[in-house]
Amino acid sequence: MQCATHGECQETFVCTHLLGETAGLGFNRNEPTRDNPFPDAWCDNCELIRAAHNGWNEQSEKLAKISSLCSRCYERARLRNTRTSITFDDLADLRWKCGSCEEWHTGPCLDFSYGSPYYWSKEHEKASDRSELLPSWSKNRRKTFLDEDYCAINNDDFFVRGIIHLPIIGAAETFRWGVWGSVSRENFGALLKKHEDPKRIELPAMFSWLSTQIPEYPDTLNLKMYAHIQEIGLRPHFRLEQTDHPLSREYHKGITPERVKEIMLARLRGNE
């Protein structure tokens, strides 16, 4: 089938309650097999209907209202609606100070970001400061710079800031790493040129190497990914190539609420 979000994908079938951004409704299905990796799925309420009618038949299927869904939307629905015993309810009163806006917030903290690529050094910062003193016509100006969205080093290496969204199992929210990824000179130039252009979302996905070291994982430098450009005011979304690396597994298969809590509380320790 053709999905408006994911393009051409395998067609799957779920109850209508699993469509959209629902979460925590339960995700029931038969065991996937090699021949059928996406068996029909239904929520817990529809499971009550199925059980009351001794299985799926014409009447129970009519009450459940089955709809089609692309296989990638199916996987997202599975991650959001799989029930877990762990929730974030006990973190409703957690207080933490945001490193970006310097304001205090209450509740779970699901965003952690890095202000520069791993390769940015104090020397690069000094070079950037020196270039600001040069006249605008100087060929040496802005060969090395860092701002909130872009970074260039010696006019040889180029980086863009974006977000890796990890779907949280059993939740509608994602856990977000704000990281940097390298891009080619051509793609970097295209991004700068279209920074304020609404048509920037038409730019194709850009190959990138992850350029942030995230200590909660084994070495994350140079993981393969693609930068998907978003609307004006929104940073790119990084899509990780599917590998056995723990970060890639959490991107494609979801991160558990327990793991999110572990990372969150460790990073916020002493910040309450």
Image (tube, rainbow, N blue to C red):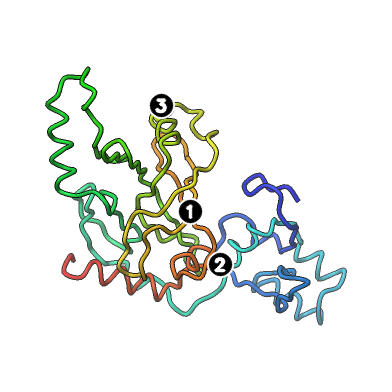
Point 41% across, 40% down: residue: 234
Residue 88 drawn at (x, y percent): 38, 70
Question: Is label 2 in a helix, a strand or a loop?
Answer: helix
Name the kind of residue labelled 3 in the image: Lys
Q: In this rendering, is residue 255 above or below 102? A: below
Point 26% across, 72% down: residue: 266
Name the kind of residue labelled 2 in the image: Leu
Mark 2 — residue? 79
Q: Which mark is residue 225?
A: 1
Residue 160 drawn at (x, y percent): 37, 43
Left or right relative to 108: residue 58: right
Mark 3 — residue? 193
Name the kind of residue labelled 1 in the image: Met
Left or right relative to 164: residue 203: right
Quadrant of the rendered image containing residue 39: bottom right
Closer to the camera in the image, 25 or 169: 169
Q: CA distance from mark 1 to mark 3?
A: 22 Å
Q: CA distance from mark 2 to mark 1?
A: 21 Å
Question: Is label 1 in a helix, a strand or a loop?
Answer: strand
Q: Earlier in the sequence, mark 1 or mark 3?
A: 3
